[in-house]
Image: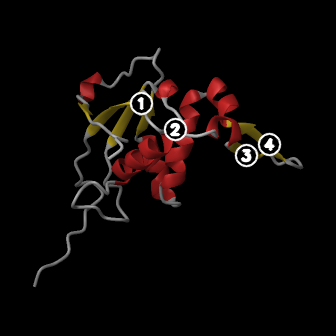
Amino acid sequence: MEKTYMAKPGAVEKKWWIVDGTDKVVGRLASDIAMILMGKHRPTYTPHVDCGDYVIVTNVDKVKFTGRKWENKRYTWNTGYPRLRSESAKERFAKHPEMILREAVRRMLPKNKLAVQMLEKLKLYTSDQNHTHQAQKPEPIELAVKK
C-alpha cells in the first residue's frame, strides 16, 4: 500500500527564478507567477505547506494590459472614512508600476496565512533598478507565453 507524499515545512528546497516582464500581459504573467509561488509546478505540491519558489521579475514598468484596461480598470480601497477611494490603472502605474503586478499576483494566491509568506517571495524591480539577488543564482524562465 502506497502512502501519499506530504511535504514537511522545512524539507522543501526553494529555487530562484528570474523573469523579464518586458511586453508581457499582466494577467497571464501573474497567473504563472502565482503557480510558482504556491509550488503547483512541482509534483510534491502540498496545499498546507509553502512549497513554492522565489520569483524575481525585472522590467515591471514595461508590462502591458490588453484592450482598454489602462483607462477602464479601477483599483478601489477603503480608508475608513465614508466613500471608497479609487484610481485607474494608468494613474497607479504612473506612481507605483510594481503595484500593478503585485496586486494581480496577490489576488491569485489563496486567501490564508500562507499567502503572506508566498507574496514575500516575489521580488519586483523596474528597468532602472538592478536586483540584488545574484548570490542566489536565479535561473531564467520564460512565462506568460501565448500558446
Q: Which residue is mark 4?
A: 85
Q: Residues within 10 Å of mark 1 (few under 14, many from 20)?
A: many
Figure quadrant of the N terminus? bottom left
Report the Cα–Cα distance between label 3 and label 2: 16 Å
**x, y (%) of residue 97?**
57, 28
- Name the secondary structure under disc 2: helix
| Residue located farthest toward the right when viewing the structure as drawn | 82
CB-based contact (under 8 Å), mark 4 and mark 1: no
- Name the secondary structure under disc 1: loop
Q: Amino acid at mark 2?
A: Leu
Q: Quadrant of residue 73?
A: top right
Report the Cα–Cα distance between label 2 and label 4: 20 Å
First of labels 1, 2 by sequence position = 1
Q: Amino acid at mark 3?
A: Thr
Q: Which residue is mark 1?
A: 21
Q: Amino acid at mark 1?
A: Gly
First of labels 4, 3 by sequence position = 3
The residue drawn where x is 22% and y is 48% is: 13
Q: Residues within 10 Å of mark 4 (few under 14, many from 20)?
A: few
